[in-house]
Image (cartoon, rainbow, N blue to C red):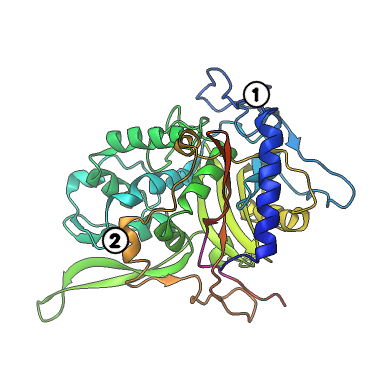
């Protein structure tokens, strides 16, 4: 959906002005020296300054002024961030670079790293060794040995059910867990997600495995540039292949079963209505990490990313409720609040002086086909009588300095599928 000419012109002028003022005054963001890979009980006094000096400070960072709404009172997350997905502005943050256990939100990095590897139609027969090493108590989608699945099936298992079994099968296809971890760490560095250290590709608790609200938001923003990533993370429910069995006539048949997205802002839950404009991204929960979540939503032409890590409040679905409150605040504050930092571009974009246009992943041709129901057409019981509609929305900004000339690449594509419910 092309932006109005006056909006684009104004955005370009603002972006150029910001770049000209900051290129000469903003120090190069660096990570805190030798940060610990063991999550600390309290946020360190000095953390990474990637994205801006204020993001390296402990506590809540926000520029409240006349006309800017106050932050929600009921926030207990150990770390959180609210960012404009289009401009990259960080509107507010709380311990943004605190290195904590990420749980399954780390699967966003896994997907962003591996999605381009195979078309969705690629088939793989699962071997016993593919499922080795899955942690006890892991979330599973129900993959069976000696059964054949498409890559499309496996990614649905990753995004909807947060299936560690699906992650391990895809890792096996990618040369094994060790190789996949190596590639994920390299990709995190490329994205300038310097708080992150991957040990297990599925986000299962592992010694030394850490990330931050800032880094998780970078993973989401990068992944959302891929059409298939957007479609998988916004899918509410899908049919997943079952186990091959013999029917009464002795003939082998293979049925399917329905899987639901465990992102409660997308699918809804008691006490958690479907969030207006939600379009993904990924949730997680482990013993060490507690509940973690990164969400993207669109409203009135604004696209926001919010990450919340480990709410301390003892209430059901606290991570979703706090995310919803921060999204509500962000939509009210957007355009009024002065940013406290920014989401940085990938290293390669910075070094090249320009970002190439979004490239298609091999899996994009198949989209979210098969038995999946994308967010735009799915129905769910959420206490409202609204209907889901598809909106083509775009976002993202890279303002880069190259060869003495300013190059503005204004529009990064963000979710084409948005689950939207009318409010009563």
* Residue at screen point 84% across, 43% down: 64
Q: Is residue 63 above or below residue 369?
A: above
Q: Residue furthest front?
A: 404
Residue at the (73%, 42%) spot, across then down: 339
- Which image quarter is the N terminus in? bottom right
Most distant residue in the right direction: 66
The stretch in magenta equals 414-419
Q: Which mark is residue 265?
A: none
The residue labelled by disc 1 is: 44
Circle 2 SS class: loop
Q: Is residue 321 above or below residue 366?
A: above
Looking at the rendered structure, the secondary structure element under dot 1 is loop
What is the quadrant of the C terminus in the image?
A: bottom right
Which residue is identified by label 2?
Answer: 120
Closer to the camera in the image, 339 or 350: 350
Residue 333 horizontal side relative to residue 212, left or right: right
Mark before the other along the chain sequence, 2 or 1 = 1
Residue with the most extreme top position: 33
């Amino acid at each position: 959906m092309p932006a109005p000419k006056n909006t684009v012109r104004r955005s370009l002028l603002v972006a150029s002005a910001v770049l000209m003022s900051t290129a000469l005054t903003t120090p190069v963001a660096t990570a805190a020296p030798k940060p610990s890979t063991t999550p600390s009980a309290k946020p360190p006094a000095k953390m990474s300054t990637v994205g801006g000096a204020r993001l390296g400070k402990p506590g809540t960072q926000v520029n409240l002024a006349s006309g800017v709404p106050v932050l929600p009172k009921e926030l207990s997350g150990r770390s959180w961030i609210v960012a404009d997905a289009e401009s990259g502005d960080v509107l507010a943050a709380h311990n943004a670079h605190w290195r904590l256990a990420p749980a399954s939100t780390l699967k966003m990095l896994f997907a962003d790293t591996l999605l381009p590897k195979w078309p969705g139609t690629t088939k793989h027969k699962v071997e016993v060794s593919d499922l080795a090493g899955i942690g006890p108590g892991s979330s599973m989608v129900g993959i069976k040995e000696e059964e054949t699945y498409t890559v499309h099936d496996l990614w649905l298992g990753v995004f909807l059910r947060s299936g560690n079994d699906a992650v391990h099968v895809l890792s096996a296809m990618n040369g094994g867990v060790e190789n996949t971890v190596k590639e994920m760490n390299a990709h995190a560095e490329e994205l300038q997600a310097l708080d992150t250290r991957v040990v297990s590709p599925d986000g299962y608790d592992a010694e030394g495995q850490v990330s931050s609200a800032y880094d998780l938001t970078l993973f989401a923003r990068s992944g959302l540039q891929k059409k298939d990533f957007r479609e998988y993370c916004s899918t509410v429910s899908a049919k997943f292949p079952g186990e091959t069995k013999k029917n009464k006539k002795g003939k082998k048949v293979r049925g399917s079963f329905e899987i639901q997205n465990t992102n409660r802002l997308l699918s809804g839950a008691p006490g958690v209505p479907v969030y207006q404009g939600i379009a993904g991204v990924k949730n997680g929960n482990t013993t060490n990490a507690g509940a973690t979540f990164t969400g993207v939503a669109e409203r009135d032409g604004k696209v926001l990313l919010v990450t919340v890590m480990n709410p301390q409040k003892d209430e059901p679905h606290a991570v979703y409720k706090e995310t919803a409150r921060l999204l509500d605040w962000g939509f009210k504050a957007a355009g009024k609040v002065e940013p406290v930092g920014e989401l940085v571009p990938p290293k390669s974009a910075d070094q090249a002086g320009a970002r190439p246009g979004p490239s298609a992943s091999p899996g994009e041709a198949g989209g979210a086909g098969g038995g999946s129901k994308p967010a735009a057409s799915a129905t769910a019981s959420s206490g409202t009588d609204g209907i889901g509609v598809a909106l083509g929305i775009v976002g993202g900004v890279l303002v880069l300095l190259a060869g003495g000339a300013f190059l503005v690449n204004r529009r990064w594509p963000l979710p084409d599928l948005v689950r939207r419910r009318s409010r009563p």
